[in-house]
Amino acid sequence: MSRAANAFHYPRRYAEAARDRRRARGVAGNSDFDAAYEFASEIGITQQAEEIRWLYDLVCSERPGRVLEIGLDEGGTLFLWTRVAAPDAHVVSVDTRPVGPLGMRAPFPLARRAFAHSRQRIDLVMPADSHDPTTLTRVEALFAGAPIDFLFIDGDHTREGVWQDFLMYSPLVRPGGLVAFHDVSQAPDRSTIGVASFWREFTAEHETEECVVGTQPGFGIGIYRVPG
């Protein structure tokens, strides 16, 4: 799409962003899963409802103060994390999605950063390759060296890509902190074969839990708690 065509569509996109910001603010910071998921599913979320409910309740019980997400997509899971995180939490999401010439003032990042409530802060690192060492440096700087409580990995779906995301970013997670992975089901579809392969290797060497609901190919959520 040309720059002129983009400019023509911007008023509508800003109006949609303003609508999403208003609706997000209508979901309380301590909301239950159903209320949070209803909004998340409207803006876009790729996780199975019962599987992400399992993870939502688990993370909610811990009220993390620092959250890192690899793979923003439409922002559905980002919204969920803001509703389970502490009122003063810092949430960072990394994604390859381009934002265009307006950068963080474009409609999409404006709306997603407005998911924060109370004293929360959201930073979007995009467009960025999570495997680039400079992205890791940016993430470390945003957290100012403080350890992460919860890391959610749902970006590159190749076996090597998931391993690289884990090896690069899990050292930032505090002892006792949580790392979660999406698409770990051992009945994968074409797009999740790499994650399923990673999970087989990972579970052979680490103590994990998982939630896989139903028989539909793909999906599944796995968790790993950092020792200590």
Image (cartoon, rainbow, N blue to C red):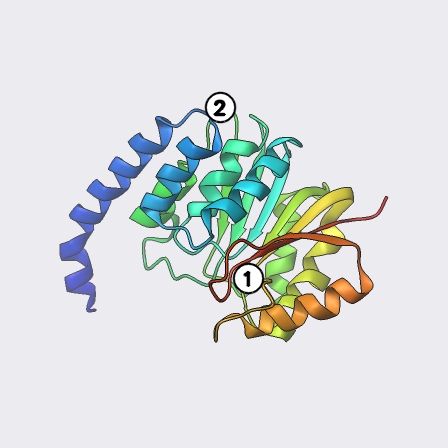
- Report the residue marked by disc 1: 183
Residue at 73%, 70% in the rendered image: 201
Residue 143 is situated, as x and y percent measured from the top left of the image, at: 65, 43
- For badge 2, the amino acid type reads Ser
Residue 217 is situated, as x and y percent measured from the top left of the image, at: 49, 67
In which quarter of the view is residue 14 placed?
top left
- Number of marks: 2
Residue 199 is situated, as x and y percent measured from the top left of the image, at: 67, 66
- Report the residue marked by disc 2: 118
- For badge 1, the amino acid type reads Asp
Indicate whether 89 appears above or below 108. Answer: above
Residue at 68%, 56% in the rendered image: 169
Q: Is mark 1 on a helix, strand or loop?
A: loop
Q: Give the quarter of the figure containing the N terminus.
A: bottom left
- Calculate the distance from the C-alpha at mark 2 to the C-alpha at mark 1: 32 Å
Depth check, mark 2 against mark 1: the one in front is 1
Residue at 53%, 53% in the rendered image: 213
Residue 93 is situated, as x and y percent measured from the top left of the image, at: 52, 50
Circle 2: is it few (<14), some (14-19), or many (20+) Cα within 10 Å?
A: few
Label 2 with label 1: CB-CB less than 8 Å: no
Q: What element carries label 2?
A: loop
Image position of 97 (left or right of 175)? left
| Residue toward you, 181 or 200 | 200
| Residue toward you, 157 or 207 | 207
Image position of 8 (left or right of 166)? left
Q: Residue furthest front?
A: 215
| Residue toward you, 83 or 140 | 83
Image position of 6 (left or right of 40)? left
Q: Give the quarter of the figure containing the C terminus.
A: top right
Tell me, for residue 131, which label it has, or none: none
Circle 1: is it few (<14), some (14-19), or many (20+) Cα within 10 Å?
A: many
Image position of 203 (left or right of 123)? right
